[in-house]
Amino acid sequence: MVQEMPDYDVIVLGAGVAGIYQIKRLTDLGIDAIVLEADEDLGGTWYRNRYPGARFDSESYTYGYSFSQEVLDEWHWKERFSPQPENLRYLNFVADKFDLRRHMRFNARVTAMSWEEETRHWRLNLENGDTYTARFVITGIGVLSVPTMPHIEGMDDFEGDSFHTYWWPKEEVPLAGRRVGVIGTGATGIQVIAEIADKVADLTVFQRRPNWSTPLNNSPISEQEMAEIRARYDEIFDNCSKSPGGFEHIPDRRGFWNVPREERLALWDRLYETPGFALLASNFTEIFMDQEANKEISDYVANRIRQRVNDPDTAEKLIPKDHGFGMQRLPLETRYFEAYNRDNVHLVDITETPIERITAKGIQTAQAHYDLDLIVYATGFNAVTGAFDRLDIRGMGGQSLADKWRDGPQTYMGILTHGFPNLLMVAGPQSVSGSTNYPRAIEGGVNWVTELVSHAMEKGLTRIETQAQAEEAWREEVIRAHERLLLRRSRGWFTGYNSNVSGHEFGKVRYQAYFGTGPKYMSMLKEAAERGYDQLELA
Ligand code: NAP
């Protein structure tokens, strides 16, 4: 090996929730590390998604970091489900508190990175022409950070404002008096639509497939409640670490068919009024595996929609018919269904009357032309692997990671991938990050990766690679956990579906997320470390 020192021991990619904690851990250990962030400031998801209505759907105090007592003592969450501006303030508060910005380089978009076996370095090329080398690269580049636009004729002809929700401008976007069209009814579309319905002159929603959605049940957090939350933080994080989804909500283990139907309905009535993912995560686990149980809960939620939407035809259009409740990532809403009771809100089912083209003045469907001043694309993301694909990552022998993952990611526990030594992924593909309360999985992932890197550095080891068979075994575990669930047949980003990205069409499951539950995943990580990383080759 050529003894050439890299510029840094570690380069962290991304200054979002993962990157902020990752750089804190590394620099606390005295490891020479920096963060490269493509955007002009920190915050990741919460820097970018500025659209009206963007907020947590995890309880704020379960989303925040758990690692610092000072942060827990000092930060006051104002709402149970905190909005984007507050979330961005929080991340800045944490970064400033620990003086982490000095380790961050902004406007530093990595376009390519390649492994150099000779020197055991990664070489990173930036858009601005800079080059860095590092012994290890740790990615915190997000699960939903590559927005995707539809391919509709005439999109460039539109003379009004138009953008993807991810690119909602920093400057105030005028809404009053404007005619707005929204394409997409996922978690993002549902938040935007509900938020702007009473602020715009006219709102037309172009819906391809409806989503199930249940009430967020948000509320302010008073000083006194915050004091109670603070006193309970240990218990809160302990609860999260034991629950499958990383929340305080825990499944009802009584057994769906052991509980009389009236009792099930009474439980659902209560959960429907409970904040957050209660109806999903405190329900019977059979709803995710047993078609009959799933049909019953789906019928229940469908009736709730019928009760809330005045026009029966509109209500039917808002009820998913192609998938059951909980089979795609559940959006949570605040008066979303009531928005359709307003005279200025119109639902266009584009499976009945497809969009033919975007014109200079609006949207032309097979039936009518809709005059618009603003078109909002809430059309989703090239989820989980998209952020890796666009980096042009080259491993051993110049192999491209995008090629290796063409039919879906292959990883060891979502953290390493064979042929790409010293590349460590926090919240990576096939981890639990996408399928559970994101920051809970991030903290676990950061801690594991940090221990691994410091173990290697203490021992003078300069190369970490996972074995091919360990990766194969993990893929089998990912598939096993996935195939148990009814969602295996669904068409959401959980299964790798995105109609706008070639290779992500419906029908080809990419096995991008691990559905084996947070506690199981974390205990497997712990055991792997205790076994001395026996699935890894350290040299
Ligand atoms: P999404 O769930 O993928 O939804 C995209 C929507 O756009 C779908 O309704 C889709 O319809 C529609 N669409 C896509 N391409 C289209 C086309 N060519 N023509 C017409 N319609 C098209 O994306 P998202 O709503 O941005 O949500 C993604 C994820 O982000 C969520 O699942 C969640 O994990 C996360 N998120 C979290 C929060 C939060 O924590 N508070 C908020 C928002 C989002 P089809 O279904 O027919 O493809």
Image: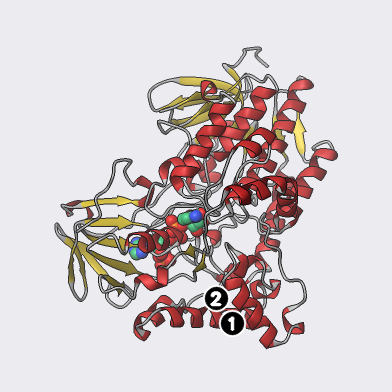
Q: Residue at x 70, y 59 (%)?
A: 244
Q: Vertically, is 528 above or below 152?
A: above
Residue 295: assigned label: 1
Q: Vertically, is 437 above or below 271?
A: above
Q: Position of residue 470 (x, y in %)?
A: 74, 46
Within 10 Å of disc 2 (Cα), the crowding (few <14, some 14-19, many 20+) is many
Q: Is residue 418 left or right of residue 217?
A: right
Q: Secondary structure at mark 2?
A: loop
Q: Within 8 Å: ligand 1 and the Cβ of disc 1?
A: no
Q: Pointer 2 and pointer 1: residues touching (CB < 8 Å)? A: yes
Mark 2 residue type: Gly
Q: Residue at x 44, y 43 (%)?
A: 85
Name the foreground residue: 1 vs 216: 216
Q: Residue at x 71, y 67 (%)?
A: 251
| Farthest right residue in view | 531
Within 10 Å of disc 1 (Cα), the crowding (few <14, some 14-19, many 20+) is some
Residue 324: assigned label: 2
Name the foreground residue: 414 vs 207: 207
Q: Position of residue 125 (x, y in %)?
A: 46, 25
Q: Vertically, is 17 above or below 477?
A: above
Q: Is residue 362 left or right of residue 506?
A: left
